[in-house]
Image (spheres, rainbow, N blue to C red):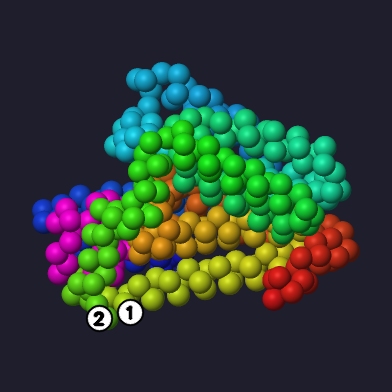
Amino acid sequence: MVIALGLVGLVAGVSAAPPGEAWDKLGLHSLHLALGLGAFLAAYLIPPHRLRILVPGLLVLVFGILVLMLASSSFGIASHSAERWIQLGPLSLQPSAFLQFLWPVALASWAAKDPLRLVQPRELIRMLAVFSVLLLPVVMQPDTGTLLILLFVSAVTLFFAGAPVRYLRILVLGAVVLCGVLFFAFPHVQARMGEFIAGTGFQVGRAVEAFQMGGIGGMGPGQGLMKHGWVPEGDTDLIFALIGEEWGLFGCLGVWTLFVSFTVFGVMASRRADTRYGAILMAAATVTIALQAAYNMAMVTGAVPIKGLPLPFVSRGGSSMIALAALLGAAVRASLVPRRSRVPVSDLIPWTESSVMG
């Protein structure tokens, strides 16, 4: 399903390219897919116990890069009212995106190492303190998309791992307060919320026009008109709108079905994992990818405020492709590791047999 999504993104990106840019888009998108495949294989080949040792150091490295981007105006690249990217040759990488790979691995490792931590307020406070420090430079960029994803994924991962709901309510309340602070602290966040409430967003308006032009069957690959600069970020964050224009409702339903299937099989894989760490990490990886896909498709249709979130494995974007592919590779490898104990994982993680998971 991930391979199918990658091929859909490649075809959609090339067919939606402006005249004369198809070969350039094909080369760049192919490069990102190759980097994603390399990241998946690298994460898959690293033994889980070694990856768990490496991740804290990698988190410190990413944190240092984020701080350096804030401290030095010549280190990062500013765009769209934020400084989130660094230039490495032909690639523009977003360091904060790699937290979507590293943090779920670290959180799953923390929760799996000692299940009693999940019911000890002191341990949870320590973990949240580290999480808050790690996210501080992300907030200052500002990168609200990555921030909200990590908050939601953390809450769901802790719930899957068995944390009491009363503790998770405090985390949710803190997230709501943080969203309110971001709203008053950053003008561009206010502007986007105002456009969403008023229904006057320029990007969403053009995306809706693309869906309307596509109708049921679409205008055909390469026949769309909105790709000529009418839909902003048409080959990245808003590629779903151009898929709707050229492939119609059936094409959109096909992409939606792939993501739903990915989510269902991801949950099944997490339930079948032999180890507690593998089960938690696979669940976290599934939620991370499914959440981004759901939000991207919802924002393109105007159901939620617009955010700079790509459609996983479909949008052209090296940072997202590498981070999510690496997360998936690590989760697949961890879910396949056999347990050393004879105690079934269902006895260690009550949620695997709960009504919540079906």
Give whichever of discs 2 and 1 has the lower sequence position.
Answer: 2
Extent of the magenta region: 223-245
Going by the image, does 112 lie left or right of 192? right
Name the kind of residue labelled 1 in the image.
Answer: Phe
Which type of secondary structure does the marked residue at label 2 adopt?
loop
Q: For the point 45% across and 53% down, which residue is it? A: 37
Q: Nearer the viewer, residue 63 or 55?
A: 63
As drawn, the residue found furthest toward the front would be 198
Q: If the image is split into quadrants, where does the C terminus sit? A: bottom right
Name the kind of residue labelled 2 in the image.
Answer: Gly
Q: Nearer the viewer, residue 349 or 27?
A: 349
Number of callouts = 2
**Could you say which quadrant of the image residue 351 lies in?**
bottom right
Q: Report which residue position mark 1 lands on.
A: 250
Q: Is residue 262 visible?
A: yes
Which type of secondary structure does the marked residue at label 1 adopt?
helix
Residue 109, how many percent across, how many down?
72, 46
In the displayed structure, 252 sits above or below 131; it is: below
Residues tagged 2 and 1 counted as in contact (Cβ below 8 A): yes
Residue 335, how many percent across, how many down?
68, 60
In the displayed structure, 83 sits above or below 283; it is: above
Q: Report which residue position mark 2 lands on.
A: 217
Q: For the point 34% across and 35% down, which residue is it? A: 81
Q: For the point 84% across and 57% down, which residue is it? A: 340
Q: Is residue 105 visible?
A: no
Q: Count neighbours of disc 1 (C-alpha within 10 A) and say few if under 14, some if 14 to 19, many if 20 or more.
A: some
Residue 122, how many percent across, how many down?
82, 37
As drawn, the residue found furthest toward the right would be 342
Q: Count neighbours of disc 2 (C-alpha within 10 A) and say few if under 14, some if 14 to 19, many if 20 or more.
A: some
109 magenta-colored: no
Q: For the point 59% across and 46% down, which residue is it? A: 176
